[in-house]
Image (cartoon, helix red, strand yellow):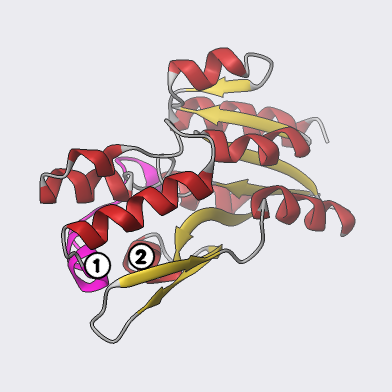
């Protein structure tokens, strides 16, 4: 039996940090896991920038509350559920994701969480597990599931490679070129075709 493991940002919803950068005018926050492969380096840089500009968790949540799912995402998720189960596996944080997951109909989400101080400033991030996307895939496979994984960034690659089928969705050219052996899709319709074919061949 197949199960879908998918990234969140860039697949179903806009990139959160990019939108925070746009709304605040802080261009440095536009960097994502599409640009920097080391998540620890990326997050430490982000937290430094937030402190420098006195941005709190509430400030970021206010921006996130105005985001909407990507066009076609809700319809695609509904279609997926008619075929199999979906687990969203993301390197975002519970404190960021909740309003977005509500709009998506609350599929199962595995992600991380944040630590804030008394003034609401984010002082640390807490990984649920290191390389959690790959480990989620392995855990499902240990339960005799076959995994179709969908992602768009460097931090998705270990999950995509561990899955029976890994699909890069609307990934940057650099990521595609460095992982040219993976399947590629640029629209939800292409994803549907790939998934339908794989499940039909089971």
The residue depicted at 48 percent of the width and 70 percent of the height is 113
Does the magenta segment cover residue 64? yes
Quarter the C terminus occupies: top right
Where residue 32 appears, x then y in whole percent? 39, 39
The residue depicted at 12 percent of the width and 49 percent of the height is 23
Q: Is residue 138 above or below residue 184?
A: below
Quarter of the view holding residue 158: top right
For label 2, the residue is: 96
69 left or right of 152 in image:
left
Where residue 97 appears, x then y in whole percent? 39, 64
Does the magenta segment cover residue 157? no
128 left or right of 66 in image:
right
Where residue 109 appears, x then y in whole percent? 54, 64
7 left or right of 136 in image:
left
Nearest the eye: 8 or 133:
133
As measured in the structure, the alpha-carbon distance from the residue carrying label 2 to the one carrying label 1 is 6 Å
Nearest the eye: 88 or 125:
125
Label 2, secondary structure: give it: helix
Q: Earlier in the sequence, mark 2 or mark 1?
A: 1
Residue 61 - label? 1
Q: Is residue 62 above or below residue 200?
A: below
Label 2 close to label 1 by CB (< 8 Å): yes
The residue segment tinted magenta is 56-74
The residue depicted at 73 percent of the width and 31 percent of the height is 198
The residue depicted at 43 percent of the width and 68 percent of the height is 124
> Callout 1: few (<14), some (14-19), or many (20+) C-alpha neighbours within 10 Å?
some
Where residue 117 appears, x then y in whole percent? 33, 81
């Amino acid at each position: 039996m197949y199960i879908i493991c998918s990234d969140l940002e860039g697949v179903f919803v806009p990139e959160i940090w990019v939108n925070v950068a746009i709304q605040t005018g802080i261009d440095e926050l536009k960097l994502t896991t599409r640009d920097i492969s080391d998540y620890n380096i990326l997050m430490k840089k982000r937290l430094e920038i937030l402190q420098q500009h006195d941005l709190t968790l509430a400030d970021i949540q206010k921006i996130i509350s105005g985001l909407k799912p990507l066009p076609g995402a809700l319809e695609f998720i509904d279609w997926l559920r008619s075929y199999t189960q979906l687990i969203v596996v993301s390197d975002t944080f519970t404190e960021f994701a909740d309003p977005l997951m509500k709009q998506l109909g609350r599929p199962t989400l595995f992600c991380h969480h944040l630590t804030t101080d008394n003034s609401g400033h984010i002082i640390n991030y807490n990984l649920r597990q290191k390389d959690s996307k790959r480990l989620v895939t392995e855990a499902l496979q240990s339960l005799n599931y076959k995994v179709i994984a969908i992602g768009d960034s460097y931090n998705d690659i270990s999950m995509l490679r561990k899955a029976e089928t890994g699909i890069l969705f609307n990934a940057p050219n650099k990521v595609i070129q460095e992982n040219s052996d993976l399947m590629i899709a640029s629209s939800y319709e292409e994803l549907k075709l790939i998934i339908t074919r794989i499940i039909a061949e089971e």
